[in-house]
Image: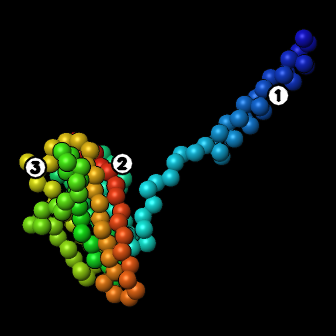
Amino acid sequence: MDARTNRLVQIGLGIALLVVVVAAVVFIDIGEPNPLPDAIQSVAPVDGSQVPRQQPVIVDLAPGFDADLLIRDRATGEWGPVEPERLRWEPATGVLTWSPPEDANPSGNFDLRVEYRAISGLPEQGAYEWTIRTY
């Protein structure tokens, strides 16, 4: 191969590599986050987060909604309410906050569920589930 042919092959390979990289960036499936229902404006920590075990759980509801926060029991797999004395509901802002006790929340995965219902307007209810990992 002469120098000119060699140069054309290098340019062609460079363009092919560039096309592959651009296609990978455009078409790669990075996955969809767990979409929130319209009744829930945000949750923190978000689904799949790894947080300190003292991290409070915050659910911000849309206006006109009320909710209960539940946690899945690891032994039975059943859903149960979080401790009411550690739960704070701010009706004016629609924010539900749960502060887990430091000694009763070992490290690991926690499945959380918020069950919401409309308190005004048309009847609407539903649930949203997510998982966090504490350390």
Reply above or below: 120 against 46: below
Which amino acid, mark 3? Ala
Crowd around label 2: few <14 · some 14–19 · many ≥20 (10 Å): some
Model colouring: rainbow
Report the side of 103 relative to 120 (left or right): left
Q: Residue at x 65, y 45 (%)?
A: 27
- Is the N terminus in the top left, top right, bottom left or bottom right quadrant? top right
Q: How far apart are labels 1 and 3 at the CA level?
A: 62 Å
Which amino acid, mark 1? Gly
In the picture, the disc for residue 12 is 1
Report the side of 130 relative to 92 (left or right): right
Quadrant hosting residue 121: bottom left
Q: Position of residue 107 (x, y in %)?
A: 19, 42
Residue nearer the viewer, 94 or 119 = 119
Q: Secondary structure at mark 2?
A: loop
Which amino acid, mark 2? Gly
Q: Which residue is mark 3?
A: 104
Q: Secondary structure at mark 3?
A: loop
Q: How far apart are labels 1 and 2 at the CA level?
A: 43 Å
Q: Position of residue 125 (x, y in %)?
A: 36, 74
Crowd around label 1: few <14 · some 14–19 · many ≥20 (10 Å): few
Reply above or below: 33 against 122: above
